[in-house]
Amino acid sequence: MEYNFQEIEQKWQQAWEQANAYAVSNQSDKPHYYVLDMFPYPSGAGLHVGHPLGYIASDIYSRYKRQCGYNVLHPMGFDAYGLPAEQYAIQTGQHPEVTTNENIKRYISQLRKIGFCYDWSRSVKTCDPGFYKWTQWAFVQMFNHYYDTAAQKAKPISELVARFEAEDPTWATLSEREQQERLMQYRIAYLADTKVNWCPALGTVLANDEVSEGLSVRGGFPVEQRVMRQWCLRVSAYAPRLLEGLDRVDWTESLKETQRNWIGRSEGAEMRFEIKGQNNPITIFTTRADTVYGVTFMVLAPESEYVERLTTAEQRAAVEEYLGWVKHRTERERIADRKVTGVFTGSYAINPLTNAEIPIWISDYVLAGYGTGAIMAVPAHDSRDYAFAKHFNLPIIPLIEGADVSEQSFDAKEGKMMNSGILNGLEVKDAIAKMKEYITNTGIGRVTVNYRLRDAIFSRQRYWGEPFPVYYKDNMPYTLPEEALPLQLPEVKDFKPTETGEPPLGHAQFWAWDEANKCVVDKSQITNHKSQIYPIELCTMPGFAGSSAYYLRYMDPHNDEALVSKQANDYWQQVDLYLGGSEHATGHLIYSRFWNKFLYDIGVVCKDEPFKKLINQGMIQGRSNFVYRYIGEGATGNLYISYNLINNPEYKDKVQPIHVNVNIVHNDVLDIDAFRAWMPEYKNAQFVFADGTSSEVEDNPYMGAAMPKMYICGWAVEKMSKSMFNVVNPDDVIAKYGADTLRLYEMFLGPLEMSKPWDTNGIDGVHRFLKKAWNMYEEISDAEPTAEELRSLHKLIKKVTWDIENFSFNTSIPAFMIAQNELAALKCNKRAILESFAVLLAPYAPHIAEAMYERCSVESRKSKVESSNFVIDAPWPECNEAYLVEDTQKYPVQFNGKVRFTLECPKDTPKDEVEKLVMAHSETARQLNGATPKRVIVVPGRIVNVVL
RNA sequence: GCGGCAUUGGCGGAAUUGGUAGACGCGCCAGACUUAGGAUCUGGUUCCGAGAGGAGUGAAAGUUCGAGUCUUUUAUGCCGCACCA
C-alpha cells in the first residue's frame, strides 16, 4: 500500500478532533506537566516555516510526556493586540478586531494542519474581554499595592495609609488630593511625569525594549525624548528579586546573562559633596569610591534637579543655552554624534577627603535616570571623564602606580594606589573596601546597590489595546470597582489620534464613568462635579500587558471569578517547559516574571517564578535563490546564466544576481516554465544551461522524447522575507510532503537552539525514510522477534528516549533511519517490533505512527498510539553489546591507540582484575597484532590501554 | 568597551561521561532497472597518495596513556547590552 500522507493525516486529525483527544483536565491522578509555546502575534502574512520550529519541538515533548503517563497541559493562544493591526486599520478603516480575527483563523488552520496536540478548548486571545478582564484586574491590584522594600514584597496600599496615619502627624493635615499624590509615589502601578520615548510617526510612547538605536523596533521611526504624564509599573522595585530568581530557574546561561545585563546590578557608594558657599550638599553614586582623591570635577545630568540650585548668575545664560540644545537633540542624534559637550555651572564642590574645591559641570554624558544623576569625575581612571577633561582642559590626577594617563585613562581595577592619602599602597580591590568602610564610618555617604532596570512605561496612545480601568476625578485617577471589569474597548469612528493630540479613544462617545450607577455612559454628560460622571483614561495598555500572565489563564481559561482558581494553580503550579525566541529576553520575559512575582506577593499564584525551564529555539533564516542575468557585451537583459558557469571567463563579472522565488526552484534547479510565468519581465527569458548550451531540449538518444535541461541557481542565507522571495509556507510543504515530513524535517535541520537557514534540499531524504518505514508494515507476522531485531529496536528506544529528554530532537531522526534500515535489511515484519517502532515515532510523526499502529492491530481495538505507553522501561534483550547491559562496565581495549576489542566486566571490578582479564585476552591480542602486550594501563573506571 | 555563543568534509550536521572523528541526510560518483529520469534500488564518497601509508575538528600552546570535547592565549563570525559612573 502506497504511503498516502494526505489521506492518513486528514483521517487522524479528524479522529483526534472528534475524540477530543488532547483535552486535558485539571483533575488527574497522573503527574502533571505544563508545556508552553510563546503565543504568536497573528500577522497578516500567516505562518512561514520558521514559526512552527519551536511548536514542533514542544509538541514532540508534550506527546512524549503524555505517552510516559503525564497529564500534559499544552495550550495555544494569540497575542492579539498590537500595532500592525492598528496601522492597517488606520490605512483601510477596517476594524482591527476584524483583521485580527481573520488572521487568527488563518493561523489556527495552519497550525491544525501540522498536527499539534493542543487543547484548543483552552485557547485564549488577549483582545477577548473575558481575557483582558484579568489584565485590567491585575492592573487595579498593582494600583492598590505598594512595594515594601524592607519586607521585599508587595503590600496593600491601605497598610501604607495606616502606617502614615500612625507614624506621620502631617498626614492628617493633607488634603485628599495631597494624600493621593503622596500615595502615587508608592503604588506599583502609578502615574508620573516621566521622560519617555515618544515616537511621533506612531503617535505613541514606547518602552525601552521597543526602541533600538533611537528608532522604534516596529517600523523603524525616529524616537525622541519627552516628558509626559504616563502610567508606569514599578518594575525596578523587583530588580533584586528578578536578579536572584535567575539562580533558581533552568534557563540557558546566555539568556540569564542577557537578563542580568538588563537588570544591571552594581555595587557602589553614595557620597555627599558639600557645595562651596551653600549649606546643602549634593549626592553622587560611584562604584569607584577608591578614586575619590582623583576627582577633579563633578558632572550633573542636564535634567538633574541640582542644576537649578548650582547654576550661578554669571553662568545662567550659558547653562540655559546648553540645556535648550540638549533638549532638542533626539535620542538618535545623541547616539549618532557622541562628541563631548558640557557647560560649567559656576559652582564648586568640596572634596570630602582632600577639601579641594572642584568645579561642577553639566553634560549629557551623565544620565539623569541612573544613580543620583550626578557623578564625581575621575578622568585618570574613567574614559568618559577623561575625554571630558581633555576637551575642557581639566586636570587629571593619576592614582595608580605605573598607570600612564598621558594618552588615555586607566580604567582597569588593578594596581597599587598612590596620591590617595589613606589608601596609598593598597591594591584597588582593598582600596574600594577600605573607602566604603571609611564613608560609612564618617557618615559622608553610604554603601548602596544600583540597578539599571527602569520602571516600565505602561501607557500607549493607541486604540488597539486594553483600556485602563481608570477614571479621573479632580484630575486624580481612581480605579473602577472590580465588578465593573472588564471595561470594554469602545467603538470609535476613527483610529487616528484626535486633532487635539488625544489618543484615538478621544473619539469614543461612550467613554465616561458614572460613579453612582457604576457604568459607562455618554461623555457628553460630564458637565460638572455634582453629576458624578467622570472622564475615563484615553490611553491603552502596551502589548506586554496581555502577554504577562497568559500562561496562568490557560490553567483555568473559562473562570469568570478569578484570573486562575487556587485549585487550578495548585495543580499546575507553573510552566514546566517554555519554548520561544530569545528576542523576548528583555521584554516579555522580564515583564512576565515581574507580573508573576507581584501575583505571588498578593497570593494569587503559588510559585514566584513562572517558567521553570526555558529553551530558546533558533531563528529559521531564509535561503534565497538567484538567477544570473547576463549584462556583458551585447546583453539583451533577457539571458540568464546557470550558476555553475558564472565564473567562466566569458561570464565573470558580467552577470547580475537576481532573487528568484524559492518556490519555483527545487534542489537549486530552476523550473524554467514557472520562472517565465512568474513575472511579465521574465516571459521571454533565455538561458545558458548547466551544460553550457542554450538549446532547451537535448536530443534523446533513444526514442526522440524531449529531455529538460537544468538551470542551476545560486543561493545565499538571508532573513526570511517577502522581498527576498525566500518565504516558504508550511502549507505548501505539507501539500507536497505531508505534515509528518515537515515535522521530521524541521527537527532534522539542526540543533533546536541554533539559528539555521531553511534549506529545502534534503527534505526528500526525510520523506523517503517515511515511505520506507511505511513499507515495513505490509505484511505483519506474529513470530517472535529475533535477538538482532530486538537489539535494533532497543538501541532506538534508548537513543530516542535520551534525545527527547535532552531536547536533542535532531539526532533522533538519523536513529530512526538507521533502525529502519537495519530492520528492513533483516526483513523484519514482527508485530512486536513494528508496534514499538510506531510508538517511538509517534511524538515526531504522529499521523503516520497512528496509521502504522493501526496496521499492526489484530482486531480493531482502539489502536491509538496514545494509549500505548512509550516503551522506556522495556526489558532489555540478552545481547552482547555492553551498553545495553546496565550493570557492567565497557572497557574498550586499545593496542597502541587503536581499539581492538571491548572487554566487559562488572562495574566495580578492581583495577588489577581488569588487567588480568586483559592479559587473559592476550591470545586474541596476539592474533590481532602479532604481538603480546608488554604493559597494560587501566585508567580507573574506563579504559584499558595496552602497550605493545 | 562589557558579556554570551559558535567555528568539524562540497553542504546541513553526528560524536551523550575525555576513549575507533566525520553517524544520518543532501550533493556527487559508479552500477542496476528503465523509452526516459529531476523515479526507485545497490555500492562508493574527509583530504593527500597509484599504493603502502600519511595528515586531519579556525590557529598556537598546555594538561592527559589518550583531546573535536578540559585549560590558557589568539583569530573569525553571530547575538545581547552599551556614555549605567
Image (tube, rainbow, N blue to C red):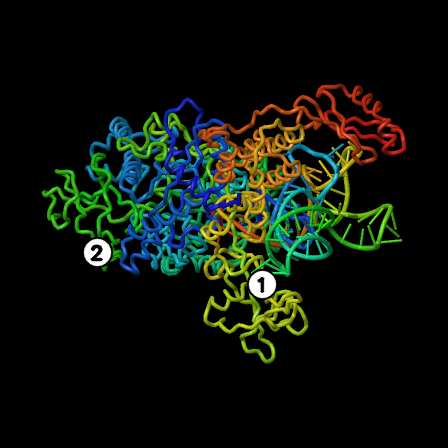
Q: Which amino acid type is marked by label 2? A: Lys
The x and y percentages for residue A352 are 48, 41
Chain letter for mark 2 = A
Rendering quarter of residue B27: bottom right
Label 2 crowd (10 A; few <14 / some 14-19 / many >=20): few
A538 up-or-down from A33: above or below: below
Residue in the picture at 39% in, 30% down: A152
SS assignment at label 1: loop
| Horizontal and vertical percent position of residue A603 | 34, 27
Q: How many numbered discs, if any?
A: 2
Please name whichever residue, A845 or A402, is drawn nearer the observer in this view of the structure: A845
Q: Earlier in the sequence, mark 2 or mark 1?
A: 2
Q: Which residue is mark 2?
A: A493
Badge 2 vs badge 1, beta-carbon distance below 8 Å: no
Quarter of the rendering occupied by the C terminus of chain A = top right
Q: Which residue is mark 1?
A: A713
In front of the other: A939 or A100: A100
Q: Circle 1 marks a residue in which chain?
A: A
Discs 2/1, front: 1
Q: Amino acid at mark 1?
A: Cys
